[in-house]
Amino acid sequence: METAAVLVGFVRTYGLIGLAIAGAFLFFGIERVSLSSKGAYVFRPLLIPGIVLIWPIVLWRWVVLELGMDDWRGRHAPARKLPGAIWAVLGIVIPLIFFGALLVRQNGPLERPAVLLEPPVAAATSETGGKAQ
């Protein structure tokens, strides 16, 4: 079997499983997971493409909430600590990259003297009446 056929088969299977889970979730699970979605039926078809694409995450989250294994207090704790660490690393890495680039650059302003630009030879000959100087 060719690689393309395997990939098409995988995408087709993934999409069909996602479509089945989207249907089950939108009919049975969304009201249990999100209390604000009770009675709101018009927006549910808009969720189908997203659920089909990320169905493993939707299924995992649905199971976690149904079994009561959700720890709502610690859900966002790692996300609150991460931006500070990222900014600390970027505060060190970006200046290092900038000053490193200044050190290793070629043709900097101190390595080569300025060159006076002159007009092209063809333009100079047409202005003098066709005579080359």
Image: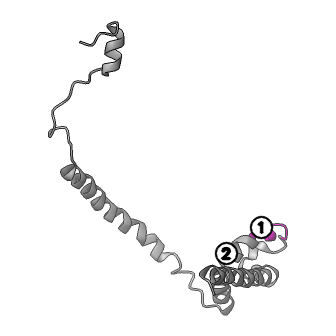
The type of colouring in the image is one colour
Three-letter code for the amino acid on which mark 1 is drawn: Leu
Q: Is residue 91 left or right of residue 30?
A: left
- Dot 1 and dot 2 residues touching (CB under 8 Å): no
Q: Is residue 111 left or right of residue 91?
A: left
Q: Nearer the viewer, residue 43 or 114?
A: 114
Residue labelled with disc 1: 46
Task: Identify the residue at horizontal 22%, vertical 55% (top origin).
Answer: 100
Residue labelled with disc 2: 53
**Tag 2, which secondary structure?**
helix
Q: Please provide percent x and percent y for residue 62.
A: 68, 85
Q: Nearer the viewer, residue 27 or 40?
A: 27
Give the label on residue 67, or none.
none
Three-letter code for the amino acid on which mark 2 is drawn: Leu
**Tag 1, which secondary structure?**
helix
Q: Which residues are drawn in magenta?
A: 41-47
Q: Please provide percent x and percent y for residue 108.
A: 20, 42
Q: Nearer the viewer, residue 60 or 1?
A: 1
Precedes in sequence: disc 1 or disc 2: 1
Bin the neighbour count of mark 2 within 10 Å (Cα to Cα): few under 14, some 14-19, many 20 and up.
some
Q: Is residue 112 left or right of residue 38?
A: left
Among the 4 quarters of the image, the one containing residue 7 = bottom right
Q: Quadrant of the N terminus?
A: bottom right
Task: Identify the residue at horizontal 64%, vertical 91% (top origin).
Answer: 68
CA distance for labels 1 and 2: 13 Å
